[in-house]
Every structure is written in structure tokens, then in C-alpha cells.
Image: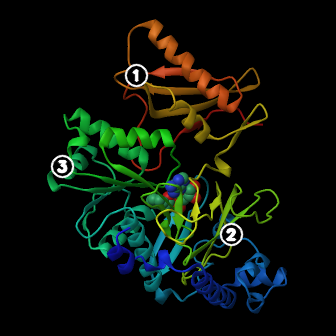
Amino acid sequence: MDLKVKNDCCAADFMPVGELRAVQLSRLQKIVEHAYNNVEFFRNRMNENGVKPSDIKALEDIQKLPFSKKIDLRDTYPFGLCAVPMSEVVRLHASSGTTGKPIVVAYTKEDLDVWAEVMKRGLAGAGLSEKDIIQIAYGYGLFTGGLGAHYGSEALGATVVPASVGNTQRQVMLMRDFGVTGVCCTPSYFMHLIEQAKLAGIDMRDLPVRVGIFGAEPWSQGMREQLESGSGIEAFDIYGLSEIIGPGVAIECTEHQGMHVFEDHFYPEIIDPDTGEVLPDGEQGELVLTTLSKYAMPMIRYRTRDLTRIIAEPCKCGRTIRRIDRISARSDDMFIIRGVNVFPSQIESALLTVPGVTANYLIILTTEKGMDNIEVNVEMSPEAFSDQVKVLESLQRNITKAVESVIGLRIRVKLVAPQTIARSEGKAKRVLDQRIKG
Ligand code: DLL
């Protein structure tokens, strides 16, 4: 890490651990008091649990505080968790989710500054600077991806191309004509951009684009390899969620060994999702986050449903802020087939070990004769696409074997021609559940 960057905007990433813990504790004490004094929901929950803000004397005391969940945001829709008067709220975002009312999140001016700061630190850690031209192809609007990446890139001093999603051919044209060097979008959308560029006769590897900031959905190592080899960029995993701030809760550095959590602003814990017990660093479980410096809508011990582990060992880059591992899955993405728990991410990882397979796939769950079945539709790469039955059968067998050995269930694999599975511009939809319920 070059010292200039380290000293400029990212000093907090390299803070001595003792100092970092002191900052976290003093921020935690303040935010808990703020939430208790200003949000009825948090006050009631803490009273029910017999805990007061003054009980937070050390960082470990965070464990005395009750958890919060997505349902709490839904139940208090739209502004029940707001901790400041509306006159201090300068921005709202919302995430639609799959069912019912959206969840709404609010920001003060200072909260937006924190958000821009963490995004800026993350982008700088990925090697971007004021010299870069960054195209933002996350959706702008209520979704936090577009504006989050936008203000972070501006804070960095980079030249921002606010392309938002859609109009894929134009995106490629902008990248080429403007000499874009960094792209922020979902990994599945970048895959789509590579394909569309190819169709337009452009090899992304010939363009100056060199860094991709990819997140908002799970993606595997195999997908990283396809993205990097198809475009010549270096891909960085970025994590975040609306409830906590948006993108910029954690991001990889150039070591690519997990995502550094900006833990001076977001305090991470890992719990056993069944018992709620706090697990030691290194153990896999559900990520719980507490916002240490977000005042419009503080979140105390928010259960993200995202499964990962904390990596506390020092990173080669020298940052002292801890890392989380790639999000292996969301606990609510899991489906149960004939008693076996299956995560879509396991299927993706297995699929992409087979040469000739692309990251475009759809998992279809059906009920046949009262039994649940998994069918995986897999798109072949144009190079692997063949009209020879033998070639196809062998590819199908290889895929079936690779997936079955990982999930331990019989599956049906259907090979489909290139460009036949619907592309997404935002978060890819990987599972179609057509099972008969009840
Ligand atoms: O997806 C914020 C974001 C925008 C993150 C752009 C990164 C880049 P939500 O729409 O509220 O916010 O969805 C949050 O998406 O709880 C995870 O399940 C999933 N997710 C986000 N980033 C990653 C990632 C944005 N890098 C939910 N890997 C989270 C895996 C991710 N899953």
C-alpha cells in the first residue's frame, strides 16, 4: 500500500488495534444511548431485556443488547425506527425484498458523509484514485447501490459516469469512448456486459478498464475467474446492505483474502443462527452488525441473515480492521430438498468447476409424484456449444457429477444454448421455486 493513500483517506484502516477498540467503544456507548433515548422500539426491547445504555462499559457488553431483525423494520414501517426529527433526514432509501412492504432507511447529512467516507476508503483500497474514470452501473434510485458508489467515487475525486443499469450496448460504448478504468455493478451484470461487448465486436480486454467493484449478490470464485479472464479486470468483492448503510460495509483489498469491515463504523459479530450464541472469530455463522456512527436510523445488533466468518488474523496489506469471508449464503436462500439443506451458491461453485459452463444458470425446483426435484438449466459457452450429441452428453454428465458430489442429491441437468437464460441488470434471480406447497 502506497503511503500517500494510507495517510490520506485510509488512516482509520490502519489504526493500532487498541485505538480502534477505544473508538468503537466510545461510539457504541453514544449510539446505544441515542437509540434508547430516541427510538421507542429500542427502548422497549432494552427495558424488556433489563439493560440500560449505562451498562455498556466494555465492547463485550454489546452482547447484553437484544438483536434486531428485518421484521422490526417492517413492523415499524415507514419511519418507526427513525431516531432524529424528519427535518434532519436528508435522504431515504428503500429495499423492496420479496414480500410485503419495503423496508425504509433514513440518513442525516452526517450519515451520508460516513457512507461516502467508507466507500471512498474501499475504492482506494481497491487501487482506484482521483485519476480514474468510474462507471456506476448499479441501479440509481431507492436501491442503495447506485448512489452509494456514486458519492464514494466522487469523494475519492474520481471522474464519475453515472450510467445506472440498463441499455447495455450504450454502457459498453461509454466504457470504450470515455476510457473508463473502473466499473461498479453486480457481478452478473458485468458478465452480461462482457457478452454484449463481444457481440458488438469489442473485446473488453482491449479496453482500459482494470478494476471491477462487484457486490449486492453472492458470487463464487469460479465466477471471479470468468469475469477476470473475460475482461482483464481485477475483481473486488464489496458487501453491504440497506439496513446498515448500503454498499461499503466491507470490501476486499488487493490481497483478495476476505473483505475488510469498516469496523470503526460497523461493529461485526458472528452468531449461531439457531441459538443466538456469539461465536469466536474464525467460526462460520450469521453476521450481526451494529452501526456505530449512523444517527438517523441506528441499527443495534442487526441480524443480517448472511452467513460468513470473521477473519481476525492480520492481513498482508497492513490494515488492522478485521475481515469477513466471502458471503457463502443467506440463511433464507437455503432450500430444503428431501431433507437436505441446499444453498444456490453451492450449486454455482460446483457448476463453474466444469469447463464449457457459463455463470448463467437457473435452478428450478419442482414437485413430481409428491417428491421435490432440482433441475438446473445451464448455459454453455459459445465455444462449448456443439451439435454433437456425444459432446453434449459428456458435458451434461460432468456437470451432474460435479453438482451431485457437492450437494449429495440427485439432480437433473438441462443444457441450454448460449444467450437463452434471462440476464439481469441488478441482482440475478437464480432460483425458480415451482414446488407445490402444503
Ligand atoms: O445490495 C447493497 C449493495 C449494493 C452492496 C451494491 C454491494 C454493492 P440490499 O439490496 O439491501 O443492499 O441487499 C443486501 O445483498 O444482506 C446480502 O444478502 C446481499 N449482498 C450484498 N453484497 C453482497 C456480496 C445491497 N458482496 C443483501 N456477496 C445482503 C454476497 C451480498 N451477498
Q: Which mark is residue 176?
A: 3
Q: Which mark is residue 417?
A: 1
Query: Visible in this render: residue 374?
Result: no
Q: Which of pointers 2 and 1 lies earlier in the amino acid sequence?
A: 2
Q: Residues within 10 Å of mark 1 (few under 14, many from 20)?
A: some
Say what amino acid the circle numbered 3 marks.
Arg
Q: Nearer the viewer, residue 53 or 431?
A: 53
* Disc 2: which residue: 72
- Residue at the image point whose x is 41% and y is 72% from the top: 121
Query: Visible in this render: residue 438?
Result: yes
Task: Classify the position of the C terminus by image quarter.
Answer: top right
- Residue at the image point whose x is 50% and y is 86% from the top: 86
Query: Where 290 sits versus 331, above or below?
Result: below
Relative horizontal placement of residue 364, taking residue 390 as reference (left or right): right
Query: Which of the two discs, 2 and 1, sits closer to the camera?
Result: 1
Q: For numbered disc 1, what is the local secondary structure?
A: loop
Identify the image quadrant of residue 9. Answer: bottom left
Q: Residues within 10 Å of mark 2 (few under 14, many from 20)?
A: some
Q: Position of residue 65 (x, y in %)?
A: 76, 78
Query: Where 416 sits versus 99, above or below?
Result: above
Q: Position of residue 345 (x, y in %)?
A: 58, 41
Relative horizontal placement of residue 54, taking residue 176 as reference (left or right): right
Say what amino acid the circle numbered 2 marks.
Asp
Q: For numbered disc 2, what is the local secondary structure?
A: helix
Q: Nearer the viewer, residue 71 or 272?
A: 272
Q: Which of pointers 1 and 3 lies earlier in the amino acid sequence?
A: 3
Say what amino acid the circle numbered 1 marks.
Ala
Q: Position of residue 175 (x, y in %)?
A: 22, 51
Q: Which of pointers 3 and 2 lies earlier in the amino acid sequence?
A: 2
